[in-house]
């Protein structure tokens, strides 16, 4: 559900001149009326002496987009990204590149100054960590894929001390082991907090992303479930842990319930998971966002499903037909299900209430709604996705504390 449209294009870069004046990073703000987007161009000299240019769109969570660098001199630059019909040309005047951005018939001024866009992320841990971590790999034979991730042991861990561990499963879209988005690293922040409070964790790069191999292009939620299942098997074989649970965020919560229903986890933590059929959950998301933007919230399940089924997105076709009822109602292990009331991607009044209704009775279950939190469990204003990048907080401290205390209570 955290699927955000991000530019992803790889175009090889060629450059025929070297200009010291336009090397390094240059940033600017593109004013598109409805919002302002930061863009950053990195002009980098290669060993051959040529220059390549990578573009970041940090407000869209996109980094390292390769450009076609058509021309560069000591005071001029011209580049394009044909796959998105974008081009930029500019001329260096004193300390500013005065230029023009073009895309899809739209022409806008875009001036660049030296520097990069940096975000304040105070919850990201800094070295030294004070606890042990190690890279661990596992293999999923059904996908012919090897997964690489980070196992974080609690502070003061000893080999003869069995502790609980959680395996973290990310939301939709390819993500690294930190579930990184807009420089936020929620899984890293969770892992750090757990380690400092006596709980181990394992987080891994998604299939075909980061240091993990495999092909995710036609994979579905069901396929990603097999990845997580193999990760659990790996942790079980290590024999170091007392209980093995799953923290699933968004789509990852659906995977957590799939594995919970199969008795493959000792406990499940659902963070912003769906509780209704996929098409219903996604249409509610669309209408919520339309309403927030002042547009008619008139999308119907029938119209949305017809649009999806006429397309080619294998993942989405599976997801709109996924019905979580059976998995949730068959998960008899302890469950913690949480949601933010300002989440516009997984609507709490629809989904969290359904999860609460479907869960088998268990005295250890916790279902909690957090006021003022969005889909990433940040304190926010509107809950819309365009706020994510500009919020310093990665995840509410209250959520971190509640997750930790609940696991310990088991």
Image (tube, rainbow, N blue to C red):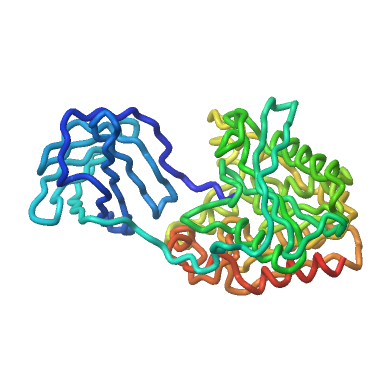
Residue 332, position in %: x, y? 90, 54
Q: Quadrant of the C terminus?
A: bottom right
At horizontal 18% and vertical 28% (from top left) the residue drawn is 16
Q: Position of residue 227 (x, y in %)?
A: 72, 37
Measured as percent of width and height from the top left, residue 375 is found at: 58, 60
Q: How many marks?
A: 0
Q: Position of residue 133 (x, y in %)?
A: 67, 53
Choose top left, top right, bottom left or bottom right for residue 42. top left
Give the residue displayed 56% in from the left and 63% down from the top: 125
Q: Is residue 329 left or right of residue 398?
A: right
Return the residue nearer the eye: 113 or 395.
113
Report the side of 358 relative to 183 (left or right): right
Taking 298 as reference, is 104 left or right? left
- Residue in front for this viewpoint, 293 or 92: 92
At 82% across and 51% down in the image, what residue appears?
328
Image point (43%, 60%), residue name: 293
19 or 75, which is in the foreground? 19
Res 159 → quadrant: bottom right
In terms of depth relative to the viewer, which is nearer, 320 or 211? 211
């Amino acid at each position: 559900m955290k699927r955000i449209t991000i530019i992803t294009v790889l175009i090889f870069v060629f450059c025929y001149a070297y200009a010291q004046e336009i090397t390094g990073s240059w940033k600017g703000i593109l004013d598109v009326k409805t919002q302002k987007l930061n863009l950053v161009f990195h002009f980098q000299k290669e060993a051959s002496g040529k220059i390549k240019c990578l573009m970041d769109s940090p407000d869209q969570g996109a980094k390292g987009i390769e450009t076609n660098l058509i021309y560069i001199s000591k005071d001029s630059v011209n580049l394009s990204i044909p796959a998105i019909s974008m081009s930029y040309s500019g001329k260096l005047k004193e300390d500013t590149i005065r230029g023009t951005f073009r895309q899809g018939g739209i022409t806008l001024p875009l001036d660049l100054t030296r520097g990069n866009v940096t975000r304040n992320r105070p919850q990201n841990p800094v070295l030294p960590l004070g606890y042990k971590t190690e890279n661990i790999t596992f293999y999923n034979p059904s996908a012919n894929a090897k997964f690489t991730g980070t196992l974080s042991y609690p502070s003061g861990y000893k080999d003869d001390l069995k502790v609980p561990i959680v395996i973290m499963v990310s939301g939709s879209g390819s993500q690294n082991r930190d579930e990184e988005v807009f420089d936020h690293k929620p899984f890293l922040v969770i892992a750090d907090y757990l380690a400092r409070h006596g709980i181990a964790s394992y987080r891994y790069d998604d299939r075909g992303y980061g240091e993990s191999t495999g092909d995710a292009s036609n994979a579905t939620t069901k396929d990603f479930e097999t990845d997580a299942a193999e990760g659990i098997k790996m942790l079980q074989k290590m024999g170091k842990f007392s209980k093995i649970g799953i923290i699933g965020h968004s789509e990852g919560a659906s995977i957590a319930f799939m594995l919970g229903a199969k008795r493959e986890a000792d406990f499940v933590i659902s963070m912003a998971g769906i509780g209704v059929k996929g098409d219903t959950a996604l249409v509610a998301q669309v209408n919520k966002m339309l309403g927030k933007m002042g547009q008619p919230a008139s999308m119907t399940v029938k119209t949305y499903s017809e649009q999806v089924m006429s397309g080619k997105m294998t993942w989405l076709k599976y997801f709109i037909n996924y019905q979580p009822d059976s998995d949730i109602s068959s998960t008899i292990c302890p469950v913690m299900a949480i949601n933010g009331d300002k989440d516009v991607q997984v609507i709490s009044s629809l989904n969290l209430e359904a999860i609460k209704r479907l869960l088998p009775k268990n005295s250890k279950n916790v279902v909690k709604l957090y006021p003022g939190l969005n889909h990433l469990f940040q304190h926010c204003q509107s809950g819309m996705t365009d706020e994510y990048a500009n919020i310093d907080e990665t995840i509410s401290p209250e959520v971190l504390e509640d997750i930790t205390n609940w696991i310990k209570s088991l």
